[in-house]
Image: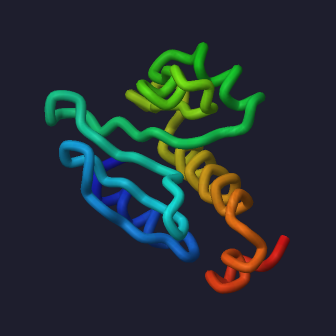
Amino acid sequence: MTLDDYNSFCASLPATNHVVQWGGAHVWKVATKVFAIGGWDDGKQLFVTFKCSDIAYDVLKEQPGCRPAPYLASRGMKWIQRQTSQSVDDAALKDYLRESHRLVALKLTKQARKQLGLGAS
């Protein structure tokens, strides 16, 4: 997945916004809550970090090309960083990004979800 592909896909999800922060990382948020981080390994390979369910985290952390996300996972959060497409191809990554968006949106208040057009449930 290229940076343009990553940014285009994240932009296609509802109620998102994009900022570049943390040393050039492309950070995608639902309202003010981060759901995806795209950054570079030595400027060559795009690493994509996303929130996931407990079960997905337990499976993905053991897969080649994935690891618990630096900083976030060390604080007990269930975030994975895809470094290569060895185990998670681009289509699967899009599914995980979509799920990350959903999980993060669910943490917003019902009122905030309604205002963003994400429904109250």
Residue 54 left/right relative to 24: right
Q: Position of residue 76 (x, y in %)?
A: 62, 25
Q: Is residue 48 above or below residue 16?
A: above
In this figure, what is the number of numbered marks? 0
Q: Name the residue at the left extreme.
A: 43
Residue at 26% across / 57% down in the picture?
20
Residue 80 left/right relative to 53: left
Residue at 62% across / 81% down in the picture?
116
Q: Is residue 15 above or below residue 60?
A: below
Q: Position of residue 51 (x, y in %)?
A: 59, 42
Instruction: Please say which color scheme the image uses.
Output: rainbow
Residue at 37% across / 54% down in the picture?
27
Q: Position of residue 48 (x, y in %)?
A: 41, 40
Residue 117 left/right relative to 66: right
Query: Quadrant of the image for the C terminus?
Result: bottom right
Q: Name the residue at the right extreme.
A: 121
Residue at 30% across / 39% down in the picture?
46
Q: Position of residue 59 (x, y in %)?
A: 69, 21
The quadrant where residue 18 appears: bottom left
The quadrant where residue 73 appears: top right
In the foreground, 85 or 23: 23
Q: Is residue 82 above or below residue 22?
A: above
